[in-house]
Image: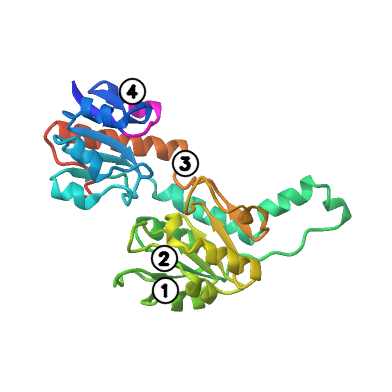
């Protein structure tokens, strides 16, 4: 069987399927990574995830490597230029997780707008018997600005319209045949919307794209939702503005140094936190794993990969 280096663990459906076709070498279990790579230097196949990725050093240690199959859409942790320079194919798992991430986006917005988490605690603390819960906002009639109108962004837009929200967007280029108003300036869009939803990839070009100026433009009645990468938002500036009231709220599924995060966020009632659960449903994770397997098997059989990145 062909050798497959697996950078991090994956669910049993993936392990079982790959185990029938490959000799799986578990990088995450190796005490000495250098020795491990030396012993697996003939491997032509590698599976990883969006968090662990694959560096140029690992590629150099595997000179026969032909394909990197990534479990996830984001590939910012994979050195794509190094892969391209070495003729290594890279695949990811787009589309199959769009519904799940879009669902969570609306869930986070509802949780923050209707203060669902805080209201739940209000009841558990026995406060309801002393008086009703304060009035909240609602999504209907508000304006949502989507940062990144890709596959996931479009699914969020569809759901937002069902909630009677007005949709606008910002991205690198205008998508002429989409029905939503386009903003060339992210700061201008933030100034005009109630909700700013970030769903773009991470990487050097998008690091702290949602900076202090953008967050201040969003204002004391606005809220930021992040399901892209923690690096997209200037986290320190966001916390400062949330504390001062210059930013109305935040609902976050990703963080700069997850799973660690600033404890300041824990005590804020105008913040909803989620432990990077965007695609974490049984259905979606199975589909992601299945796509990882099918990309590897396609390459093994000499066929084009299904979802190529490079």
Q: CA distance from mark 2 to mark 1?
A: 8 Å
Mark seen at residue 186 = 1
Q: Nearer the viewer, mark 3 or mark 1?
A: 1
**Which of the two discs, 2 and 3, labels the residue nearer the N terminus?**
2
Q: Identify the residue position indicated by label 4 in the image.
A: 16
Which residue was labeled with disc 3?
280
- CA separation in Å, label 4 and label 2: 38 Å
- Front in this rendered view, residue 9 or 141: 9
Q: Residues within 10 Å of mark 1 (few under 14, many from 20)?
A: many
The crowding category of the residue bearing disc 2, from other C-alpha atoms within 10 Å (few below 14, some 14 to 19, many at least 20), is many
* Residue closest to the eye, 122 or 138: 122
Tell me if residue 120 comes above or below residue 270 in the rendering.
above
Q: Are marks 2 and 1 in contact (CB under 8 Å)?
A: yes
Position in image of residue 278 (x %, y %): 47, 48
Which label's residue is closer to the chain start, 4 or 2? 4
Image depth: mark 4 or mark 1 in front:
1
Give the alpha-carbon distance from disc 4 to disc 1, as whole Å.
45 Å
> Residue visible at 66% across and 58% down?
268
Q: Which stretch appears magenta?
A: 7-16
N-term mark: 3 or 1: 1
Mark-to-mark CA distance, 2 and 3? 22 Å
Disc 1 on helix, strand or loop? helix
Going from N to C along the chain, the mark reached first, 2 or 1, is 2
Q: Which residue is mark 2?
A: 147
């Amino acid at each position: 069987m062909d050798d497959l280096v697996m950078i991090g663990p994956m669910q049993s459906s993936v392990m079982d399927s790959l185990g029938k076709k490959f000799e799986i070498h578990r990088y995450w279990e190796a005490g000495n990574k250098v020795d491990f790579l030396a012993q697996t230097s003939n491997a032509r196949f590698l599976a990883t995830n969006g968090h662990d990725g694959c560096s140029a050093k690992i590629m150099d240690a595997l000179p026969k490597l032909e394909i990197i199959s990534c479990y996830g859409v984001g590939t910012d942790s994979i050195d794509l230029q190094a892969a391209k320079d070495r003729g290594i194919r890279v695949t990811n798992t787009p589309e199959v997780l769009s519904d799940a991430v879009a669902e969570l986006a609306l869930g986070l917005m509802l949780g923050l707008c209707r203060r669902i988490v805080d209201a739940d605690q209000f009841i558990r603390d026995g406060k309801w018997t002393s008086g009703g819960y304060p009035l909240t906002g609602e999504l209907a009639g508000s304006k949502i600005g989507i940062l990144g109108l890709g596959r996931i962004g479009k699914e969020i837009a569809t759901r937002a319209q069902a909630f009677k929200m007005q949709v606008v967007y910002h991205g690198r280029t205008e998508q002429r045949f989409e029905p939503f108003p386009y903003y060339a300036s992210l700061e201008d869009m933030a100034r005009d919307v109630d909700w700013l939803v970030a769903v773009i990839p991470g990487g050097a070009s998008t690091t702290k794209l949602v900076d202090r100026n953008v967050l201040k433009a969003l204002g004391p009645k606005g809220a930021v939702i992040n399901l892209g990468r923690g690096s997209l938002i200037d986290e320190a500036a966001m916390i400062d503005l949330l504390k001062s009231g210059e930013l109305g709220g935040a609902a976050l599924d990703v963080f700069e140094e997850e799973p660690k995060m600033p404890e300041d966020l824990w005590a804020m009632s105008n913040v909803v936190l989620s432990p990077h659960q965007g695609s974490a449903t049984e259905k979606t994770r199975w589909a992601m794993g299945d796509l990882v397997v099918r990309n590897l098997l396609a390459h093994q059989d000499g066929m084009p990969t299904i979802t190529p990145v490079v």
